[in-house]
Image (spheres, rainbow, N blue to C red):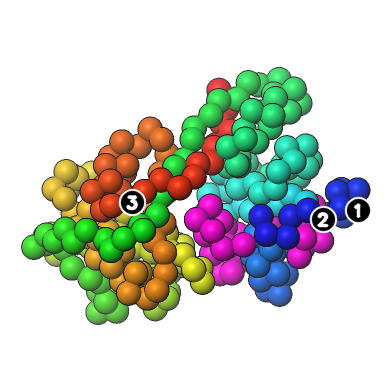
């Protein structure tokens, strides 16, 4: 976390909650987190008002940060290298079930949570990968770039694809500020790849395919189109997936992604 290293003694008693209405504070905190593959989602959500945060210490040099997305409050992300500082924020947070933190913080944080709650914790690692070369072109006749003309298709598919908010607040915002590609079948959008988060240096790609249409190469081809657009914009493409998501890892491998780091979900056992 850029800016980490503030005097803990001065930060332990100073806590700030940053929400949608605190525009300036959100931007200061986003800058403090830095622009890395591991922070791209949190920074994106803060900049777009899609998450709230609780902070120990000053916003520009926090001791610990928890970013809680409004869309998935049960899985907040924690930043900082002190498990006790993160737990001091997390224990007063509503709605969380698991916490996403740096790999080294998983075991000590799990010990603190288990001691306080009486419930053991388990771990799921998340792999962060980037494209360090031009994306492999993998075309499919049913897959194409999505444009504003496709907005009705996207909005109609929101529920079926589980894309409430489209990661930018709306499908229209995604098309205006990011990139999307997908497959249309039976006059419906059945698969989509999209920029799930975008910062100055990085853009993360997500993919969703409706269950009946999986296994046809739609996700891989659509993701290749989105990755190419991101690279053409001069940004580094990020792919993150849980260690046990074999299908997602296979798509990333086909596209040429290379692992650069890992974080971990501390979950109920």
Asked if the stretch drawn in magenta spans residue 19, the answer is no
The quadrant in which the C terminus is found is top right
Pointer 1 and pointer 2: residues touching (CB < 8 Å)? yes
Which residue is denoted by mark 3 in the rendering? Answer: 257
Q: At which x and y percent is residue 131?
A: 35, 57
Q: Which sits earlier in the primary sequence, circle 3 or circle 1?
A: 1
Asked whether residue 61 is drawn in magenta, I would say yes
Q: Which residue is mark 2?
A: 6
Quadrant showing the N terminus: bottom right
* C-alpha gap between disc 2 and disc 3: 35 Å
Could you tell which of marks 2 and 3 lies nearer the N-terminus?
Answer: 2
Residue 139's tag is: none
Category of crowding for the residue at label 3, using alpha-carbon neighbours closer than 10 angstroms: few (below 14), some (14–19), many (at least 20):
many
Q: Is residue 91 above or below residue 66?
A: above
* Magenta-highlighted residues: 34-62
Q: Secondary structure at mark 3?
A: loop
Q: Dot 1 surroundings within 10 Å: few (below 14), some, or many (20 or more)? A: few
Residue at 41%, 45% in the rendered image:
259
Residue situated furthest front in the rendering? 133
Say which residue appears at 11% left-offset and 60% top-offset: 140
Distance of label 3 from label 1 (alpha carbons): 41 Å
Q: Position of residue 8 (x, y in %)?
A: 86, 48
- Looking at the picture, does residue 169 appear above or below residue 205? below
Q: Is residue 165 visible?
A: no
Numbered badge on residue 10: 1
Give the x, y percent position of residue 204: 42, 59
**Camera sees residue 137:** yes
Instruction: Name the element at disc 1.
Output: helix
């Amino acid at each position: 976390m850029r800016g980490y290293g503030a005097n803990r003694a001065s930060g332990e008693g100073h806590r700030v909650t940053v929400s949608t209405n605190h525009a300036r504070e959100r931007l200061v905190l986003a800058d403090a987190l830095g622009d890395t593959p591991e922070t791209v989602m949190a920074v994106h959500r803060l900049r777009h008002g899609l998450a709230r945060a609780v902070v120990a210490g000053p916003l520009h040099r926090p001791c610990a940060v928890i970013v809680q997305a409004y869309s998935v409050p049960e899985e907040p992300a924690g930043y900082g290298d002190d498990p006790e500082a993160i737990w001091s924020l997390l224990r007063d947070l509503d709605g969380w079930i698991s916490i996403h933190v740096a790999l080294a913080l998983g075991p000590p944080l799990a010990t603190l949570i288990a001691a306080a709650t009486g419930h053991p914790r388990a771990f799921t690692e998340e792999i962060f990968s980037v494209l360090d070369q031009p994306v492999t072109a993998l075309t499919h006749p049913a897959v194409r770039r999505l444009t504003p003309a496709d907005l009705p298709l996207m909005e109609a598919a929101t529920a079926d694809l589980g894309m409430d908010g489209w990661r930018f607040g709306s499908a229209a915002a995604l098309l205006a500020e990011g990139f999307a590609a997908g497959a249309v079948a039976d006059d419906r959008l059945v698969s989509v790849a999209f920029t799930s988060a975008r910062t100055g240096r990085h853009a993360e790609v997500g993919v969703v395919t409706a269950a009946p249409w999986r296994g046809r190469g739609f996700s891989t081809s659509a993701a290749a189109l989105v990755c190419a657009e991101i690279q053409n914009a001069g940004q580094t493409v990020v792919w993150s997936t849980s260690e046990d998501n074999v299908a997602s890892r296979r798509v990333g491998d086909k596209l040429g992604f290379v692992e650069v780091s890992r974080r971990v979900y501390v979950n109920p056992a």
